[in-house]
Amino acid sequence: MARKKNEPVRTTLEEVNEQLSTAAQRLEDNKKYIYWALGAIAVIVLLVAGYVYGIHNPNMEKAKDLIGKADLEMLQGDRENALKDYEKVFDAYSNKPAERAALNAAILLYQDGKYKEAVAYLEKYDPEGNLVGPAALSLMGDCYVNLKDYEKALVAFDKAIHMAGDNAYYAPTFLMKKATLMHAKKNYKEELRAYETIRDKFPEYQQIYQLNLDKYIERAKALAEGN
Protein backbone atom coordinates (compact mmCIF):
# COMPACT_ATOMS: atom_id res chain seq x y z
CA MET A 1 0.00 0.00 0.00
CA ALA A 2 1.36 3.42 -0.91
CA ARG A 3 2.51 5.63 1.95
CA LYS A 4 0.43 8.75 2.48
CA LYS A 5 2.27 11.96 1.78
CA ASN A 6 2.37 13.21 5.36
CA GLU A 7 2.70 9.85 7.09
CA PRO A 8 5.76 9.75 9.40
CA VAL A 9 8.63 7.60 8.17
CA ARG A 10 10.45 5.37 10.63
CA THR A 11 14.09 6.36 10.77
CA THR A 12 17.15 4.17 10.69
CA LEU A 13 17.99 5.17 14.24
CA GLU A 14 14.63 3.95 15.45
CA GLU A 15 15.50 0.52 14.12
CA VAL A 16 18.93 0.68 15.71
CA ASN A 17 17.36 1.60 19.03
CA GLU A 18 15.13 -1.45 18.88
CA GLN A 19 18.06 -3.69 17.97
CA LEU A 20 20.22 -2.41 20.83
CA SER A 21 17.45 -1.78 23.40
CA THR A 22 18.61 1.82 23.83
CA ALA A 23 16.77 4.72 25.41
CA ALA A 24 15.12 7.22 23.07
CA GLN A 25 15.38 10.97 23.42
CA ARG A 26 12.82 13.25 21.83
CA LEU A 27 13.61 15.62 18.97
CA GLU A 28 10.54 17.56 17.88
CA ASP A 29 10.31 18.16 14.15
CA ASN A 30 6.72 18.49 12.99
CA LYS A 31 5.79 16.47 16.10
CA LYS A 32 7.83 13.47 14.98
CA TYR A 33 10.05 11.38 17.26
CA ILE A 34 13.68 10.92 16.30
CA TYR A 35 15.75 8.49 18.27
CA TRP A 36 19.42 8.70 19.24
CA ALA A 37 21.04 5.32 19.57
CA LEU A 38 24.44 6.12 20.95
CA GLY A 39 23.34 8.06 23.99
CA ALA A 40 22.72 4.86 25.92
CA ILE A 41 25.60 3.09 24.18
CA ALA A 42 27.95 5.89 25.19
CA VAL A 43 26.82 5.56 28.78
CA ILE A 44 27.77 1.89 28.82
CA VAL A 45 31.05 2.42 26.99
CA LEU A 46 32.13 5.36 29.12
CA LEU A 47 31.34 3.66 32.39
CA VAL A 48 33.41 0.65 31.40
CA ALA A 49 36.15 2.67 29.73
CA GLY A 50 36.68 4.66 32.88
CA TYR A 51 38.62 1.78 34.33
CA VAL A 52 41.27 1.86 31.61
CA TYR A 53 42.71 5.16 32.74
CA GLY A 54 45.15 3.67 35.28
CA ILE A 55 45.95 5.96 38.20
CA HIS A 56 49.56 5.24 39.15
CA ASN A 57 50.87 8.47 40.67
CA PRO A 58 50.94 8.23 44.50
CA ASN A 59 49.85 11.87 44.62
CA MET A 60 46.56 10.76 43.09
CA GLU A 61 45.70 8.25 45.82
CA LYS A 62 43.03 10.43 47.39
CA ALA A 63 41.43 11.04 44.02
CA LYS A 64 41.70 7.33 43.27
CA ASP A 65 40.01 6.40 46.53
CA LEU A 66 37.20 8.91 46.09
CA ILE A 67 36.53 8.00 42.48
CA GLY A 68 36.59 4.32 43.45
CA LYS A 69 33.98 5.09 46.10
CA ALA A 70 31.86 6.85 43.47
CA ASP A 71 32.23 3.90 41.08
CA LEU A 72 31.07 1.52 43.79
CA GLU A 73 28.11 3.75 44.59
CA MET A 74 27.25 3.77 40.90
CA LEU A 75 27.32 -0.03 40.75
CA GLN A 76 25.12 -0.20 43.84
CA GLY A 77 22.59 2.13 42.25
CA ASP A 78 23.32 5.05 44.57
CA ARG A 79 23.37 7.57 41.76
CA GLU A 80 22.89 10.65 43.94
CA ASN A 81 25.97 10.06 46.07
CA ALA A 82 27.98 8.82 43.09
CA LEU A 83 27.32 12.11 41.32
CA LYS A 84 28.30 14.08 44.42
CA ASP A 85 31.57 12.19 44.72
CA TYR A 86 32.41 12.56 41.03
CA GLU A 87 31.81 16.28 41.40
CA LYS A 88 34.07 16.35 44.48
CA VAL A 89 36.89 14.71 42.54
CA PHE A 90 36.52 17.19 39.71
CA ASP A 91 36.42 20.18 42.05
CA ALA A 92 39.43 19.05 44.10
CA TYR A 93 41.83 17.82 41.42
CA SER A 94 43.17 18.75 38.00
CA ASN A 95 44.35 15.50 36.48
CA LYS A 96 43.15 12.43 34.62
CA PRO A 97 41.00 11.20 37.53
CA ALA A 98 39.32 14.62 37.53
CA GLU A 99 38.60 14.30 33.82
CA ARG A 100 37.09 10.86 34.29
CA ALA A 101 35.02 12.21 37.16
CA ALA A 102 33.74 14.98 34.89
CA LEU A 103 32.87 12.42 32.24
CA ASN A 104 30.98 10.15 34.64
CA ALA A 105 29.20 13.12 36.17
CA ALA A 106 28.09 14.10 32.66
CA ILE A 107 26.76 10.58 32.07
CA LEU A 108 24.65 10.66 35.22
CA LEU A 109 23.35 14.13 34.45
CA TYR A 110 22.48 13.04 30.90
CA GLN A 111 20.55 10.07 32.27
CA ASP A 112 18.66 12.45 34.55
CA GLY A 113 17.73 14.70 31.63
CA LYS A 114 19.96 17.54 32.85
CA TYR A 115 21.49 18.16 29.45
CA LYS A 116 22.85 21.65 30.04
CA GLU A 117 24.68 20.52 33.18
CA ALA A 118 25.97 17.44 31.35
CA VAL A 119 27.38 19.62 28.57
CA ALA A 120 29.17 21.78 31.15
CA TYR A 121 31.07 18.72 32.38
CA LEU A 122 31.67 17.31 28.91
CA GLU A 123 33.28 20.59 27.89
CA LYS A 124 35.81 20.03 30.69
CA TYR A 125 36.71 16.60 29.36
CA ASP A 126 39.50 16.32 26.80
CA PRO A 127 38.36 13.66 24.30
CA GLU A 128 41.11 11.36 23.16
CA GLY A 129 41.61 7.95 21.59
CA ASN A 130 39.24 6.26 19.15
CA LEU A 131 36.88 4.80 21.73
CA VAL A 132 36.08 6.97 24.74
CA GLY A 133 36.82 10.28 22.99
CA PRO A 134 34.34 9.90 20.13
CA ALA A 135 31.73 8.40 22.46
CA ALA A 136 32.01 11.48 24.69
CA LEU A 137 31.61 13.76 21.68
CA SER A 138 28.57 11.83 20.54
CA LEU A 139 27.09 12.12 24.03
CA MET A 140 27.65 15.86 23.80
CA GLY A 141 25.81 15.85 20.48
CA ASP A 142 22.91 14.01 22.09
CA CYS A 143 22.78 16.64 24.83
CA TYR A 144 22.65 19.45 22.28
CA VAL A 145 19.91 17.67 20.34
CA ASN A 146 17.80 17.55 23.48
CA LEU A 147 18.58 21.22 24.09
CA LYS A 148 17.46 21.83 20.48
CA ASP A 149 20.81 23.43 19.62
CA TYR A 150 21.15 21.48 16.40
CA GLU A 151 24.13 23.36 15.00
CA LYS A 152 26.27 22.50 18.01
CA ALA A 153 24.94 18.95 17.88
CA LEU A 154 26.10 18.68 14.28
CA VAL A 155 29.57 19.97 15.19
CA ALA A 156 29.83 17.37 17.96
CA PHE A 157 28.71 14.53 15.69
CA ASP A 158 31.14 15.58 12.95
CA LYS A 159 34.00 15.59 15.45
CA ALA A 160 32.94 12.17 16.69
CA ILE A 161 32.87 10.83 13.13
CA HIS A 162 36.32 12.23 12.42
CA MET A 163 37.81 10.89 15.65
CA ALA A 164 36.25 7.44 15.15
CA GLY A 165 38.09 7.10 11.84
CA ASP A 166 37.63 3.62 10.38
CA ASN A 167 36.05 2.12 13.49
CA ALA A 168 33.49 -0.12 11.81
CA TYR A 169 30.93 0.28 14.57
CA TYR A 170 31.37 3.77 15.91
CA ALA A 171 31.82 5.68 12.66
CA PRO A 172 28.63 4.43 10.96
CA THR A 173 26.62 4.87 14.15
CA PHE A 174 27.66 8.50 14.36
CA LEU A 175 26.96 8.91 10.65
CA MET A 176 23.42 7.65 11.20
CA LYS A 177 22.97 10.17 13.97
CA LYS A 178 24.12 12.89 11.61
CA ALA A 179 21.82 11.62 8.86
CA THR A 180 18.83 11.72 11.19
CA LEU A 181 19.69 15.23 12.32
CA MET A 182 20.03 16.31 8.69
CA HIS A 183 16.64 14.78 7.94
CA ALA A 184 15.11 16.74 10.81
CA LYS A 185 16.71 19.92 9.47
CA LYS A 186 15.49 19.08 5.94
CA ASN A 187 19.07 19.06 4.64
CA TYR A 188 18.43 15.99 2.52
CA LYS A 189 21.64 16.22 0.50
CA GLU A 190 23.75 15.88 3.63
CA GLU A 191 21.45 13.13 4.87
CA LEU A 192 22.00 11.28 1.61
CA ARG A 193 25.77 11.76 1.77
CA ALA A 194 25.91 10.29 5.28
CA TYR A 195 23.93 7.19 4.28
CA GLU A 196 26.02 6.68 1.16
CA THR A 197 29.19 6.86 3.24
CA ILE A 198 27.86 4.11 5.49
CA ARG A 199 26.91 2.00 2.49
CA ASP A 200 30.25 2.42 0.72
CA LYS A 201 32.67 2.31 3.68
CA PHE A 202 30.89 0.14 6.24
CA PRO A 203 28.73 -2.42 4.40
CA GLU A 204 29.03 -4.93 7.25
CA TYR A 205 27.28 -2.53 9.61
CA GLN A 206 23.90 -2.73 7.93
CA GLN A 207 24.32 -6.50 7.62
CA ILE A 208 24.93 -6.91 11.34
CA TYR A 209 21.86 -4.86 12.27
CA GLN A 210 19.78 -5.96 9.28
CA LEU A 211 19.20 -2.40 8.17
CA ASN A 212 17.71 -1.76 4.77
CA LEU A 213 19.85 1.26 4.07
CA ASP A 214 18.79 1.42 0.42
CA LYS A 215 15.28 2.56 1.29
CA TYR A 216 16.65 5.47 3.32
CA ILE A 217 19.00 6.36 0.49
CA GLU A 218 16.10 6.33 -1.94
CA ARG A 219 14.01 8.47 0.38
CA ALA A 220 16.82 11.01 0.82
CA LYS A 221 17.40 11.12 -2.95
CA ALA A 222 13.74 11.76 -3.64
CA LEU A 223 13.56 14.48 -1.02
CA ALA A 224 16.81 16.09 -2.20
CA GLU A 225 15.59 16.14 -5.81
CA GLY A 226 12.29 17.64 -4.70
CA ASN A 227 13.99 20.59 -3.02
Image (spheres, rainbow, N blue to C red):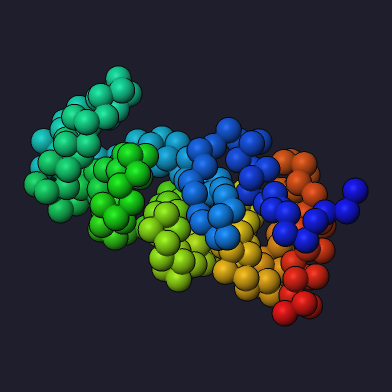
For this orientation, the residue located farthest to the top is 76
Residues 75 and 95: in front is 75
Instruction: Quadrant for the C terminus, please.
Output: bottom right
Q: Tell me if residue 211 can be seen.
A: yes
Question: Which residue appears at 54% of the width and 49% of the height?
Answer: 36
Q: How many marks?
A: 0
Tell me if residue 54 comes above or below residue 74 in the rendering.
below
Question: Which residue appears at 82% of the width and 63% of the height?
Answer: 218
Relative image position of residue 154 (x, y in whole percent): 49, 67
Q: Tell me if residue 100 can be seen.
A: no
Q: Is residue 200 left or right of residue 152?
A: right
Relative image position of residue 143 (x, y in whole percent): 39, 54
Question: Which residue appears at 79% of the width and 70% of the height?
Answer: 221
Q: Is residue 202 left or right of residue 81?
A: right
Q: Is residue 147 left or right of residue 79?
A: right
Q: Is residue 172 left or right of residue 153?
A: right
Question: Which residue appears at 75% of the width and 71% of the height?
Answer: 223
For this orientation, the residue located farthest to the right is 1
Tell me if residue 17 comes above or below residue 174 in the rendering.
above
Residues 131 and 226: in front is 226
Relative image position of residue 48 (x, y in whole percent): 41, 35
Residues 71 and 19: in front is 19
| Residue 219 found in image quarter | bottom right
Relative image position of residue 150 (x, y in whole percent): 46, 66
